[in-house]
Amino acid sequence: MRNEAEKAGQPVLSLQRIHKTFGGLVAVEDVGLDLYAGEIVALVGDNGAGKSTLLKIISGVHKPTSGKIYLDGKEIGLQDAATARLQGIEVVYQDLALADQQPVYMNMFLGRELLRSPLGLLDRRKMNEETRLLVEELDLRIPSTKSKVRDLSGGQRQGIAIARATRWARKLVLLDEPTAALGVAETKRVESIIKSLKERALAILLISHSLDQVFRLSDRICVLRRGAQIGIRDTRETDKNEIVSMITGLG
Amino acid sequence: MNAIGKFLRTFDMQGSIVFLGFVAIFLFFAIVLYDDGFLTTRNLSNIVLQTAPTTVMAVGLVFVLSAGEIDLSFGSITAVSAIVAAFALREHSAVAGACAGIGAGLAIGAINGTLVAYLKLPSFLVTLATLGLFAGVARSITNLQSIPVLNDFFVGFFGSGAISGIPSLVIWTVVAVAVGHLVFRETRFGAHVVATGDDAQASLVSGIRVKRIRFLVLTICGGCAGLAGLLYAGRLQAAKYTLGESDLMTVIAAVIVGGTALFGGRGSVVGACVGSLLMGMLNNGLILMGLPVSDQMIVRGLIILVAVAISLRQTER
């Protein structure tokens, strides 16, 4: 457990002057952003504004051309997605990274299965039990932790993807358009799950095209336009018109 | 009864269709062929002994199919392994012969695995090519001759012997199925095999080493085919290029009927074993019915078609 002073004072993630070019093309330009535990920061911008590139830099998929990334005050170099995961950073992808024919509890531990000594065999009971507790805690409302993922609805599946990220993230959860493929009711469910993550002292970075959603969920909003950081606003002190004009550069 | 049902459920069989089919065909033959000696202990144990090599091959194939790949070459691997073992036994001990045979199987499997996993060639084409290639090798190194196996210990250990009354072929079958089941169901490797076959992309971003899995399943399948080659060589006391040649359809059918998904993501070693016994029983019954070989082939083909269709329908829901 992190102590309270640290939680309030030091950002979980700090990006400083992050710059990324692909060939001659500038994708991200001098972005600086601090993320604190227990808050949701939304990253908004038009298509091609650099949101996804920035997310991929934080999740270790891309390396920044220049700039520094600090996690809990320590500078980190992210070699690849695996190192980012080891540092406690989890991503929920838009196109759900779940294995459809496997039960929920195996997906929760996909690639990180629990084993029992002395033979190192799978501990299905423990994985199932942990999953059941997490499902209850996040109020996921699935028929059973032994259900196959393909028998669940889109919202339930996204709930599981988020639950998995929560289970493994120690610091930071990145959500890339988590409700893009969902209906109205399911979006509402997933949003309430995302809100409940705040209580777990995780920092959350949310990419979303829906401004309504951004205003419902986020504490702060960071706007990108053509790779450049236009500004960061407290969600309570701004309105949609201001954000839209920041995104488009008009008005 | 309840305990038995619970025990069976732990095998994660997709329904119990393979058991139902097994029981149905068994009852059919038991009634129709009662006077022809189908139900005699001797005949029934013959079925089990004859299916030992195909059951061992089926265990390996469960891993390959579950991982979303295919191996068509295991029949040729069986022949080459038996021949290599037979050659080695001319001058060396039974242990050396067995190691040479299994080693040959693992090596060919590793070639398949390397081409599929690391050179990213489709396993269907790779193993279709190695099927032909090693069928040629088996013919070429033997000059189309049968190589006798005269080592008594080897013949007893892999073929006609018995330990306290239990035939060694039965022991090998049980060991292969038990170890296969344990590795497939209860280890992290087994979980990664089905995950890879289910969704390779999701597995990759979850940190599963997908390429390594693909390499290993094809290598394991080669090793199982190698063991099957030793069982053939031990039972027949000779190795010939024709060994394993006609097992391709039987083994694939046994595995699919046993509840393994043709396109990956799900498998059952125990189901494959029951499927293999079912195929052996079918073979045996059709011979006892006195059908000419041509009719046997037609009936067997039709029954396999129906059986595979039913099990796919059952599992695709």
Image: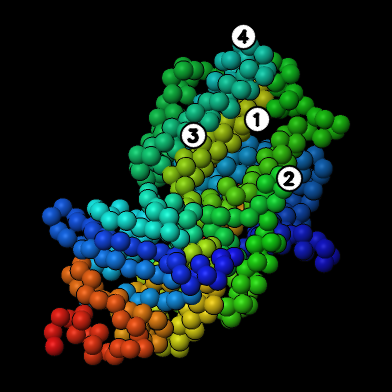
Q: Disc 1 or 4, which lies upstream in sequence?
A: 4
Which secondary structure, mark 3? helix
Relative depth, front residue between A127 and B61: A127
Which secondary structure, mark 1? helix
Q: Which residue is mark 3?
A: B109
Q: Is residue B46 above or below residue B312?
A: above
Q: Which mark is in front, 3 or 4? A: 3
- Graded by Cα atoms within 10 Å as few (under 14), some (14 to 19) or many (20 or more), the crowding at tag 2 reads few
Instruction: Check chain identity for marks 1 and 4: say if they share one.
Output: yes
The answer to whether one can see residue A93 in this image is yes
Q: Which mark is in front, 1 or 3? A: 3
Q: Is residue A242 above or below residue B140?
A: below
Q: CA distance from mark 1 to mark 4?
A: 20 Å
Residue drawn 33% across and 89% down? A237
- Total label count? 4
Q: CA distance from mark 1 to mark 3?
A: 18 Å
| Labelled pair 2, 1 in contact (Cβ < 8 Å) | no
| Labelled pair 2, 4 in contact (Cβ < 8 Å) | no
Q: Which residue is mark 1?
A: B231
The amino acid pointed to by label 4 is: Glu
Q: Which mark is in front, 2 or 4? A: 2
Residue B157: give x, y in percent of width and height.
73, 25
Residue A123: give x, y in percent of width and height.
68, 56
Q: Which residue is mark 4?
A: B91
Which secondary structure, mark 2? loop
Instruction: Check chain identity for marks 2 and 1: say if they share one.
Output: no
Q: Which mark is in front, 1 or 4? A: 4
Chain of residue at mark 1: B
